Image (tube, rainbow, N blue to C red):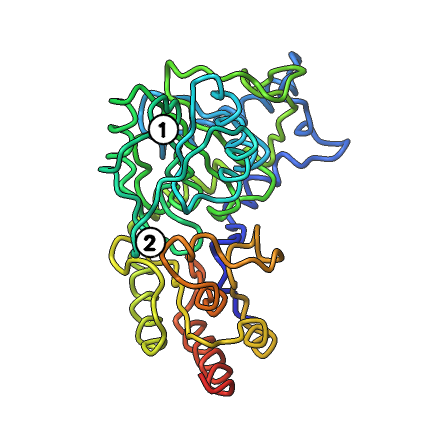
Amino acid sequence: MIYLDYQATTPLAPEAREAMLRWMGGPDSDSFGNPHSPHRMGRMAAAAVEVAREQVAALFPAGGTVHFTGNACEAINLALRGTSRAGALAISAIEHAAVRDTAQALGNVRELPVDGAGICDPDQDLPEGTGLVAVMQVNNEIGTIQPTAQWHEKARKAGALLLSDAVQAYGKIAVAEADLIAISAHKLYGPKGIGALWVRDGVSLDPQVTGGLQEKIRSGTLSPALCAGFGAAAALAQGRMEADAAHMEALWTLARDLFSDWKLNGSADQRWHGNLNIRKDGLDVARLMSDCRNVMFSAGSACASGSGRPSHVLRALGLSDKQAKSSIRLGFGRYTREEDIEQAAAAINAAAQAQGV
């Protein structure tokens, strides 16, 4: 099988797996302690957690704290619900469902439009009374890179906080300045089941999960194994960032050539080049995926792929429902080979041609 769905999840890096094994001990080991216990085994586990926290924090701007969570969705909920007292919400029209659905549940929210390239212009006005702005750094469906730093400056001048969903950016490009930043390990070649919220110094949050407040703003026993895997993946990404980016650029160039007669959704330049979202008008994507069972790709984000609704991201670009439903997303990463792209392109193009589009 050929895996081209790196925006949905990434393979676990061998280095991350190795780091986790040390803390998955059985009854005859000394590495299964609760990191919140005061005895020696607990302190050993706590030390592993803190090493991981430092590794994850190394890819963030200075002046903040990393709080581990169960996933990025929880981190986003903590950021939005924990600051709901701050005032009205303003979110970009292409935010992940974790932001959109939570903001709508909280109420008093306004969407900030994007242009046809998928860029949210920071020159637009913020509604009066806005307390928090949410603009993701790299979009999960079309890969567009937002002017997050400019949005942070705009929010600050308006007396608001900026929440950045950096799930698709963290470890791939420099994380931009914000007040609250959510990330996920499994989009970084780390384990599933752990994320983090970076909180700028001076920003206070109301805890949403209470009971022990082991993470100061979040309760629950941490898994040293998951933390260690996350930390190892972050450290690996930091050391490989330039090499990974160069690899993505080569794969992007090849894929653009092999899919040259498809239309690109979103900006070609202001974009993470590990994401290729393309369309052929009139394409039956469900049939295409059935005909290309050995190629793992997406008709949209994994979180909404079963809804049957047109992508709100593609509609925000100005695409019709039919155009949105005729789009596919190909995602590649560190372990993708050029031959993977070539074989996938041959299968997808042949299947599309068989539909007469």
Q: Residue furthest right?
A: 27
Residue depicted at x 37% and y 24%: 130
Type of residue at label 2?
A: Trp
**Where is the N terminus found, in terms of image quarters?**
bottom right
The residue at 33%/37% (across/down) is 175
Q: Amino acid at mark 1?
A: Leu
Which of the 4 quarters of the picture holds residue 177?
top left
Determine the CA span between mark 1 and mark 2: 21 Å
Q: Residue 212 placed where, x, y %?
A: 65, 15
Q: Nearer the viewer, residue 69 or 242?
A: 69
Report the residue marked by disc 2.
Answer: 272
Q: Determine crowd level at label 1: few under 14, some 14-19, many 20+ residues with C-alpha closer than 10 A.
A: many
Q: Is residue 157 above or below residue 242?
A: above
Which residue is found at the position 31% from the left and 29% from the top? 61
Tags 1 and 2 touching, CB below 8 Å? no
Residue tagged 1: 162
Say which mark, if any, is on residue 117.
none
